Amino acid sequence: MTIPDWYLDERALAGPEHLDAAYVATYDAKAGTDPAADVALLRGLGLGPDDTLVDLGAGTGTFALAAAPWCRRVIAVDVSPAMVGVLRARVAAQALTNVTVVQAGFLSYAHAGPPAAFVYSRHALHHLPDFWKAIALRRIAALLRPGGVFHLRDLVYCCDLDEFDAVIGAWLAAAPTAPDAGWTRAELVTHVQTEYSPFSWLLEPMLAQAGFTIRDRHVAATRVHAAYTCVKGEMPGA
């Protein structure tokens, strides 16, 4: 697939820290991500030994490597050369033969072969402005088979406009003070000011426009994180 020359350069919006090898080396400890629940969720939705799973915004591969034993093939995609370097090293160290690493983004990944059964993305879509999110979601739908599952986790503002100040203020107030304990208040402020987390009432119509039916929606207590389990096309009885 030829990518139009007017498409966004996703690397330019990835955040300089995600392109920095020194930062990437500390990323997993800072993020503290446990992929077990998401792997179990997708297995419960049918992920099995005949399936291909595409992980978009795979980062250092925490989820992709955890999912690899349960499916035929994992395609781990990330736009950052530093992230991809760590991911490839981990795949090699574990001698995994069913994980393919691709340096690309939501807008540049070109899927080859039969449509995927599952697409997963965690905390990556918010790097795109809403115009490009909508295009990215449509591209995700195009690489899935009918009835395929898209599981999305991201920073999403799940509140009305008149609640925004209070919700964001509470989130910032609860941030840790030490960088090695998680994302600090200053880092979260940078996210709010310079990245593109959407309101849920903007994101959800984008998912529908892309051809997805939302099967399940979970909002964190902070109301700034959400998870969506989506099915390509209409679900029976939807």
Image: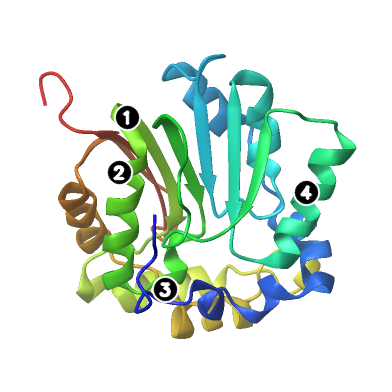
**Which of pointers 1 and 4 lies earlier in the amino acid sequence?**
4
Residue found at x 83% / y 63%: 25
Task: Say whether marks 1 and 2 touch (CB < 8 Å).
Answer: no
Please identify, in this view, whether the residue under mark 3 or under mark 2 is nearer the observer.
2
Find disc 2 in the rendering and name its residue.
Answer: 142
**Which of pointers 3 and 4 lies earlier in the amino acid sequence?**
4
Find disc 1 in the rendering and name its residue.
Answer: 145
The type of residue carrying mark 4 is: Arg
The quadrant holding residue 99 is top right
**Which of pointers 3 and 2 lies earlier in the amino acid sequence?**
2
Find disc 4 in the rendering and name its residue.
Answer: 88
What sort of colour scheme is used for the picture? Answer: rainbow
How far, Cα to Cα, is label 3 from label 4? 36 Å
Give the answer, above or below, for where 25 lies relative to 205. below
SS label for mark 4: helix
Category of crowding for the residue at label 2, using alpha-carbon neighbours closer than 10 angstroms: few (below 14), some (14–19), many (at least 20): some
**Which of pointers 1 and 3 lies earlier in the amino acid sequence?**
1
Name the quadrant of the C terminus: top left
- Residue at the right extreme, as displayed: 93
Residue nearer the viewer, 159 or 85: 85
**In the visual, does 95 lie left or right of 14?**
right
Please identify, in this view, whether the residue under mark 3 or under mark 4 is nearer the observer.
4
SS label for mark 2: helix
x and y percentages locating residue 31 in the rendered image: 69, 56
